[in-house]
Amino acid sequence: MSERESMLREVKVEDAIGMILPHDLTQILPGEFKGRLFRKGHQVTEADIPALLSIGKEHIYVIELQPGYLHEDEAALRMANAIAGEHLTLTEPHEGKVNVKSAIHGLVKIDKAFVDSVNAIDEVVLSTIRSNTVVQAGASLVGTRVIPLIVDEAKVAEVERLAAARREEGFTLLEVKPFRKLRVGVITTGSEVFKGRIKDKFGPVVKEKLAQLGSEIIDQRFVLDDSEAIVGEIHALLALGVDLVLVTGGMSVDPDDRTPGAIKQAGARVVSYGTPMLPGSMLMIAYLGDVPIMGLPGCVMHDPYTSFDVLLPRICAGETIVRSDITEMGYGGFFQC
């Protein structure tokens, strides 16, 4: 008999209050109902006694926990508490699982290395959504649980130790970053729009994407495909104190597409011209001082999810984009055939 099995014993139902059921108990009401009355892991209360007696259970098997072991609910709760941080809430344990939820609208950041180290522990589960996902308040981010009903406490303690060690190294295990309200300037290039031959389709799309993250366009300028004009408008918008400059159009390799060169000419430090993501491979990200400047390719107008949608939430959350962020976009970044 295993040590876990030795924790089982038979008691009178009246003596089972506070103890844990090792298996489901079924209720059968002929012609009305057949199903689970109490689930495995249920902690018996005084109010449960009549129901137990009604299904003929004057004696039941219960689990009497020995030192060094935890019930699945307590184990899941301890694991959730070990990783919880700012802007997060925990659900009550339910069927051996605790969910960690976001308290705000923001950008989720998850330490994948920590998650992997936890899931390398036998009988322990830490399941998460992907880092850098935009979430609303109330969204579930993480689920914690253990596989058996009764688990060795040392395994949960190891999760807690790993969490503490990772934090001491300066890592944040799980957080939701709130979005800042950015004041955004937009420069729309192209003679066809500047001269009114076609209607601007970039502006409304960009405005909606910004609004979803709590930011707004404070000014939009229209210019020809002229490098000097684009440079002038970039500096004019910076003089207004914008937090982000978006330059739309003119991002391909055609000779008359001047946007990438104009962004460089304005004095910006280019992080990357091009991303390994489809759609959105022709996007440019640069910085002039601390202000990000993005050159947006045409796909932003018509594709629902592009490299712009990957980087914009991170910028709105106050992050500075570096070259490694761009490099990592290739894995899982193929959204069109």
Image (cartoon, rainbow, N blue to C red):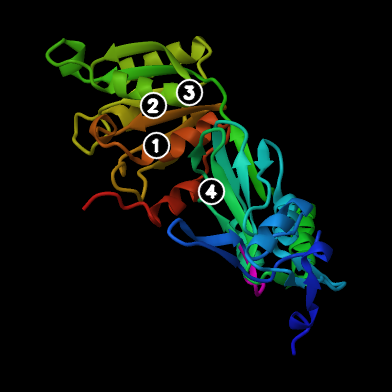
Name which of mark 1 and mark 2 comes first in the sequence. Answer: 2
* Amino acid marked by disc 1: Asp
Callout 4: 10 Å neighbours few (<14), some, many (20+)? some
Asked whether residue 181 is in view, the answer is: yes
Q: Position of residue 58 (x, y in %)?
A: 73, 69
Q: Is residue 63 left or right of residue 244?
A: right
Pointer 4: what residue? 131
Q: Are marks 2 and 3 in contact (CB under 8 Å)?
A: no
Callout 1: 10 Å neighbours few (<14), some, many (20+)? some
Badge 2 marks a residue whose secondary structure is helix
Question: How far apart are labels 3 and 1 at the CA level?
Answer: 15 Å
Q: Position of residue 78 (x, y in %)?
A: 76, 56
Name which of mark 2 and mark 4 comes first in the sequence. Answer: 4
Would residue 124 be counted in the magenta stretch? yes
Seen at 35% across and 24% down, the residue is 206
Pointer 2: what residue? 209
Badge 1 marks a residue whose secondary structure is helix
Pointer 1: what residue? 309
Q: Are marks 3 and 1 in contact (CB under 8 Å)?
A: no
Q: Which residues are magenta?
A: 120-125
Check the picture and name the quadrant holding the N terminus: bottom right
Badge 3 marks a residue whose secondary structure is strand
Q: Residue furthest right?
A: 67
Pointer 3: what residue? 244
